[in-house]
Amino acid sequence: MDTGTDSTEPVDSAPVSGGLLLEVGEAQPCAAPVPATWEKTTTLQGNGNAGPDGGAVAVEDLDGDGDLDIISSWDVGDWLVVWWNDGGTYTYELIADTEAWQLSRVDGGWVSGGQSPVIYDESLTPIGQLPPVYGAVREVVDVQGVGRLVTITSPFGPEHQWDYVVDGAELDQELASQNAFDALVFDHDQDGDEDVYVVNDNPFDGRNVMWHQQDGVLVPTDYAPIRMAGMGGDVGDLNGDGLPDLYLTAAARNILLLQNPDHTFIDVTFGWNAGVLASGKAMAWGGVFWDADNDGDLDLMVAEGDFGGEYNLDLGPQPLSLQRNSDETFSPEVWDEGSFRGLVPVDLNDDGVLDIVVSSASDGPAIWLSQGCGDHGWLRFDGPEGATIRVLGESPQTHWISRDSGFGASKPARSHVGLGDATEVLIRVEYQGLWAEQALSPNRVVKVSVDPEH
Ligand SMILES: [Ca+2]
Ligand SMILES: [Ca+2]
Ligand SMILES: [Ca+2]
Ligand SMILES: [Ca+2]
């Protein structure tokens, strides 16, 4: 099979541009063309302090040296820590001794969660604070056209559980919530602006809420009003129709929703075997779409975990599992047992196969690196958040560049696309009304930017 790995092979068409530039890198041949497996190569450790209770985990090149650094916030001890990556060697640094059960990536920097959320710049230097809240900030997201959405849970009952839109330093109470845990930003109705789906952890008094953007304001809708003890979720086009589908993690079972052309959702959890928690009695936190084997079909990764710490609810060991997608059925492949939280799929060893970083309630974050890169092709797109990547043709795919990575996790602004056996694909990239198209052979990094001449 021609895998397109000859670096002298020309890119097959000149780009056609409607305002976006595609900078196409050299082909990167696979050095170990055997089917990928993953090994836990590293468990990041602290400085000898008490054990972590992992909350958030984020992967980002904070210092711009080309190596992806790993950030984690710990509940017990309330620390925000970074492991600086220098060529695969990780050096621990305590950034802030602050409550930081969550960490959110926002435009221009980061916000840590908790009762007194701290705002950090791109390199994690503290630059400000959100007003104190009753309860805890669980998620902060930027919604283009609306502002910064803060989701809050409160121990004082539903009347104190609100989502807010931040205007400067003020918190304007606008959006009622029910123990919000995660917020997914994506264009649900495909009208060109960002909408928000809030995953709530209150199946008795509330439900998840899809907020649609209308004239710069978020308004509640009745789409996907799931009642669940929700922890997180992820967005991906599972069935290749270009419409975003949802995978939601929760207590008892996870939920897979396919979007219909009229933008309603259909619960296909049981048909796809997507809801079964491998532990049988636990709850899942991290849950993300990723194409583990680069065959063009999205797989799932699921991180189950106990609540407060290791086995706090006596649920026993909880699995970390790859859910392989084969003929529209997911089959769990348990990698590890423990008590897990956030998940980030990202290619740390640059072999074209996504790796996994996972935070834990009982240990430091672990890195699972791919061993072998198979014979399936891939493309990686680095570009602005909100950009849409389409593979056109007989096996269409749609991906969106997003930093969100399920519950409590964030990834670099990249999109990884598995291409199966294709030796050339026609790619269309769209961003804020601009676009570019180009036929590409596999195994390349493509940098997407706005053409300043346009
Ligand atoms: Ca929209
Ligand atoms: Ca879909
Ligand atoms: Ca796959
Ligand atoms: Ca890899």
Image (cartoon, rainbow, N blue to C red):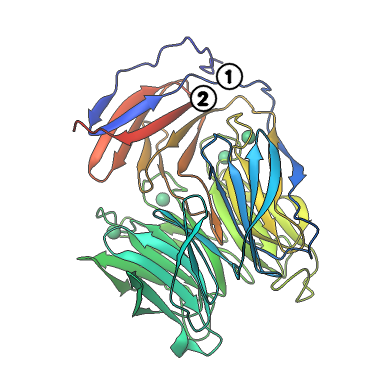
- Residue denoted by label 2: 443
Describe the element under mark 2 as helix, strand or loop: loop
Q: Residues within 10 Å of mark 2 (few under 14, many from 20)?
A: many
Q: Residue at x 54, y 74 (%)?
A: 228
User: Is residue 259 visible in the rendered structure shown here?
Assistant: yes
Residue furthest to the top: 8
In this rendered view, identify the residue nearer to me: 218 or 50. Answer: 50
Would residue 407 appear left or right of 309 to someone viewing this image? left
Q: Residue at x 59, y 49 (%)?
A: 344
Residue 130 drawn at (x, y percent): 44, 72
Looking at the image, residue 108 lies above or below residue 312: above
In this rendered view, identify the residue nearer to me: 89 or 283. Answer: 89
Q: Are marks 1 and 2 in contact (CB under 8 Å)?
A: yes
Asked if the residue at label 1 sits under 8 Å from ligand 4, the reply is no
Snapshot quadrant of residue 106: bottom left
Q: Residues within 10 Å of mark 1 (few under 14, many from 20)?
A: many
User: Is residue 248 visible in the rendered structure shown here?
Assistant: no
Looking at the rendered image, the quarter that the N terminus falls into is top right
Looking at the image, residue 98 lies above or below residue 237: below
Q: Residue at x 24, y 29 (%)?
A: 17
Which label is found at residue 444? none
